[in-house]
Image (cartoon, rainbow, N blue to C red):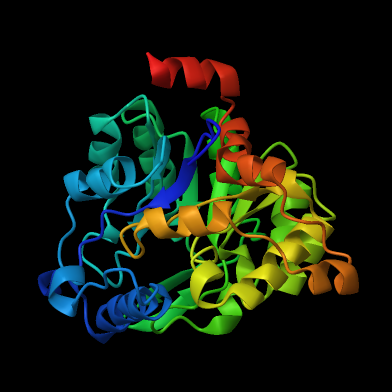
Amino acid sequence: MRDDVLVFDGVAHPFNFDRSNYLGRGGELFANHLYAFHTVLTPEDEPKLGPEEFLKEWHPEEIRRMVFEESDTDMLVSMPLPLTDLFRDGLSAWERCAELAEQDPDRTVFWGTVNPLEGRRALELMEIQVKEYGARAFKFYNVRYDYGEPFPWRMDDPQVAFPIYEKALELGVNLIGVHKGVPLGPQPIEATQTWDMDGAAANFPDINFVIFHVGLPFIDETCWQLVRYPNLYASLAATINFVVRSPRQFAEWIGKLLFWCGEDKIVYGSEAPIFHPRWALEAFWNFEIPEDLVEGYGYPQLTEQAKRKILGENLLRLHGMDLEETRRRLAA
């Protein structure tokens, strides 16, 4: 990167795609869908991994090397997945994510995760992840499975979701992310819609909620929510990776977000190791919205100031971290 830009990657997963980790056909579909994302969105002039190289157990050291040593990334969120009904360890085990964070504690932030449908057990695990492993936020998935059948829950459910938010606040955590849009494997698409974010944001104004993947394909609905609730944010994870393969489409998405919610409510995420973070970072830094979209739709231009905020400063602020103090700490 250039001009001392601080890059804070909002999501990387130490996946375990080993076939012994799959729980039935659903896990296989989910894994193959992620591999398809890797092959389709990785640019033609960048290395693409074969299935045997990608569908394996990824170790924290590999993620660390890809993000910190092979790209201009300064900080990282180590993020688990709680899909224990599709994969034996959830696919990206929270314990493995905590291990990744421990390797570079000054540069890596651990987000926890639980299954809210497990009630008291979920609340107890939240406490363990925060008090014993230093979780700074939580990430949730609204589609669970029971004997292979989808069993969704909503972010505005007073019985399932609200106790989780109350527990987070009790633990001093005010940052929560949720997978929205981008239905994977056997997930029913209606369960990935963003309608339930209104109730979550309205009832818990002291919590900042991050809508991952900007809710694609529900980008317009997401924008209407972002503009109405000051505590809703959007993550470009698995969206920024369209910047090379589908630049016109990406321009429309980022243009809509800038138009509706502005540059302060968008955060970056690489989704490593699905995508190598280097090429998307470089392409985003050099990207401009075509003038016909700026003139025709009124989209603000993607300025250097906006890029700085999106690539790191916004997520830093959501974690309660000061930019200049962080610069000094990383330089020490």
State whether residue 283 is above or below residue 193: above
Query: From the viewer's perspective, is 319 left or right of 135?
Result: right
Q: Which residue lies at the image location 39% right of the left edge and 53% below the top edge? A: 278
Q: Quadrant of residue 204?
A: top right
Q: Position of residue 18 (x, y in %)?
A: 14, 69
Q: Position of residue 232 (x, y in %)?
A: 71, 50
Q: Position of residue 143 (x, y in %)?
A: 47, 71
State whether residue 191 is above or below residue 66: below
State whether residue 330 is above or below residue 154: above
Q: Quadrant of residue 308?
A: top right
Q: Which residue lies at the image location 56% right of the left edge and 24% below the top edge? A: 321
State whether residue 234 is above or below residue 50: above
Decide if residue 194 is in sight here.
no
**Nearer to the camera, 22 or 323:** 323
Query: From the viewer's perspective, is 246 left or right of 57?
Result: right
Q: Quadrant of residue 99?
A: top left
**Nearer to the camera, 144 or 45:** 45
Q: Position of residue 23 (x, y in %)?
A: 21, 76
Decide if residue 162 is in sight here.
yes
Q: Which residue lies at the image location 71% right of the left edge and 36% below the top edge? A: 206
Query: Can you say which quadrant of the picture contains the C terminus?
Result: top left
